[in-house]
């Protein structure tokens, strides 16, 4: 038996080649799988319960995929709904699906797999010694668990299989591993376990494993000895190099990949070009182990307000770092005198765009920019505190001199008012695994016919 998985893109919202997608539908896939998010863009989506992608873009792409599913007559599965896979993200994606079902006149069975963990249940697991820290991990205790905004567990293949067992046309999954939505069906159908997980890892980002990474659409065929991967966009090719290289993507070990219930070892995998576009892979091994799921959480670490000014006077551009250091020292004294806040309650970060805003002191390249952006990030316990500090900084960011014995300069604010309230600053708060007695123990499944 061969199991064919059609993967339209690395993530919903990124776009895909529609012509290639329909070519894939004509190849009679057994399932269409697409990822819905990741932690790539930081903790804000998880902390706030909102998607990083525009709703309109998600709906437009999901419409096409729902039409493709209807034509193919196979399940459509999305993992990590809404970027972070918490309950609000799954519900958000569910509402989009309901709207489209009505607009397209589709009758569907929809399975929602929820991955969010309640603080109470996680405290119980923590007290029972079932929550284990990975390296590195922040300190964790019951009080910190209570203070988290959202906590999710990463579902594996078993949870996706349970959702598929309901006969669902569409599976809307909360946080999952990137590979689980691809590996679940071939594993359930008895294909080679090592090949299932290895092929899912290669295919997780769509055509990123090909010579045309932005083209999106691929198919992966799984069988009892290995898998084959084929990009479907015109001109795209998979090569042994492009396929084997994907084990390096978002993975600390190019040979080992941990998943719920064990780990994949590709040490002895072999990669062979079948033709100019397709690659066959064999030799990967799956090693079962304790059933653990990764935990992710986010919490509020403060509130932020930003300001920006542009330095263009040549003397200030050439001495921007000295000016910034002098300004920051002055602001320390000014804030201490004008704000009723201890020094450790807030931070003022001044980044020089065009000089070292990304790398700071690690920047090795020394250039001579025409202008420099002075970007200030204020972080404080409340939004009001952050904005008050920003307003205190405002006149000095506009006029602060390089030395005491010179006229005040005037820099440029790109907009008015010069400050912008960013709202809550979220930080990741867990890097732990949860041991389960049963794969569904930490997950909830809701099925509905519409």
Image (tube, rainbow, N blue to C red):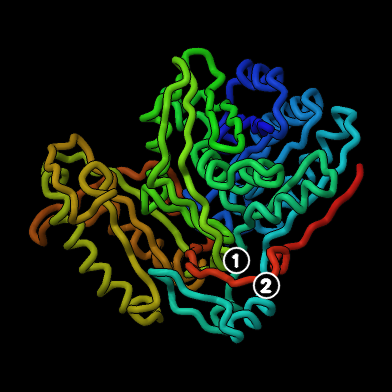
Front-most of residues 102 and 422 = 102
SS class, disc 2? loop
Neighbor class of circle 1 (other Cα within 10 Å; few <14, some 14-19, many 20+) is some
Residue at the front extreme of this rendering: 225
Q: CA distance from mark 2 to mark 1?
A: 7 Å
Q: List the residue tagged with mark 1.
A: 291
- Does 377 sit left or right of 24 as displayed? left
- Does 244 sit left or right of 112 as displayed? left
Q: List the residue tagged with mark 2.
A: 437
Regarding residue 305, the answer to whether it shows in the image is: yes
Q: Please give the name of the residue rendered at 56% of the width and 19% of the height, measured from the top-left corner.
A: 232
Q: Percent x, y for residue 366?
A: 12, 42
Q: Percent x, y for residue 191?
A: 63, 41
The tag on residue 133 is: none
Neighbor class of circle 2 (other Cα within 10 Å; few <14, some 14-19, many 20+) is few
Regarding residue 421, the answer to whether it shows in the image is: no
Tags 2 and 1 touching, CB below 8 Å = yes
Q: Percent x, y for residue 124?
A: 65, 83
Front-most of residues 212 and 89 = 212
Asked if residue 155 is positioned above or below residue 413 in the image, the reply reads below
Q: Please give the name of the residue rendered at 44% of the width and 46% of the height, measured from the top-left corner.
A: 416
Quadrant the N terminus occupies: top right
Q: Percent x, y for residue 230?
A: 53, 24
SS class, disc 1? loop
């Amino acid at each position: 038996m061969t199991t064919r998985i059609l993967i339209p893109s690395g993530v919903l919202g990124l776009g895909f080649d529609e012509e290639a997608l329909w070519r894939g539908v004509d190849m009679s896939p057994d399932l269409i799988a697409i990822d819905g998010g990741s932690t790539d863009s930081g903790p804000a989506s998880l902390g706030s319960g909102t998607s990083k992608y525009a709703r309109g873009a998600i709906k437009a792409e999901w419409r096409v995929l729902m039409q493709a599913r209807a034509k193919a007559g196979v399940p459509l599965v999305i993992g990590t709904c809404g970027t972070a896979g918490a309950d609000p993200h799954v519900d958000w994606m569910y509402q989009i699906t309901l709207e489209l079902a009505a607009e397209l006149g589709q009758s569907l069975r929809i399975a929602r797999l929820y991955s969010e963990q309640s603080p109470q249940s996680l405290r119980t697991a923590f007290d029972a010694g079932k929550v284990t820290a990975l390296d590195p991990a922040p300190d964790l205790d019951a009080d910190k668990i209570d203070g988290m905004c959202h906590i999710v567990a990463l579902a594996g293949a078993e949870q996706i299989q349970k959702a598929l067992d309901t006969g669902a046309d569409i599976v809307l999954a909360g946080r999952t591993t990137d590979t689980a939505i691809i590996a679940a069906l071939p594993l359930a159908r008895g294909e080679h376990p090592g090949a299932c997980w290895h092929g899912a890892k290669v295919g997780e980002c769509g055509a990123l494993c090909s010579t045309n990474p932005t083209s999106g659409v691929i198919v992966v065929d799984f069988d009892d000895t290995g898998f084959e991967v084929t990009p479907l966009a015109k001109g795209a090719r998979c090569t042994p190099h492009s396929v084997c290289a994907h084990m390096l993507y978002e993975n600390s070990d190019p040979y080992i990949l941990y998943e719920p219930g064990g780990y994949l070892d590709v040490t002895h995998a072999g990669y062979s070009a079948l033709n100019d576009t397709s690659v066959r892979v064999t030799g990967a091994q799956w090693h079962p182990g304790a059933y653990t799921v990764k935990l992710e959480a986010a919490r509020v670490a403060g509130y932020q307000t930003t300001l920006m000014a542009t330095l263009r006077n040549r003397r200030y551009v050439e001495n921007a770092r000295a000016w910034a250091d002098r300004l920051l020292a002055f602001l320390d004294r000014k804030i201490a005198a004008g704000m009723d806040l201890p020094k450790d309650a807030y931070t003022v970060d001044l980044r020089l765009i065009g000089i070292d805003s990304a790398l700071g002191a690690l920047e090795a390249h020394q250039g001579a920019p025409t202008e420099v952006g002075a970007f200030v990030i204020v972080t404080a316990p409340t939004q009001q505190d952050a904005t008050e500090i920003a307003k205190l900084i405002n006149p000095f960011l506009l006029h602060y001199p390089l030395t005491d014995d010179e006229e005040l300069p005037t820099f440029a604010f790109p907009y008015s008012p010069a400050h912008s309230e960013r709202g809550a600053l979220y930080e990741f708060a867990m890097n732990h695994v949860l041991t389960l007695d049963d794969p569904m123990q930490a997950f909830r499944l809701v099925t509905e016919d519409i």
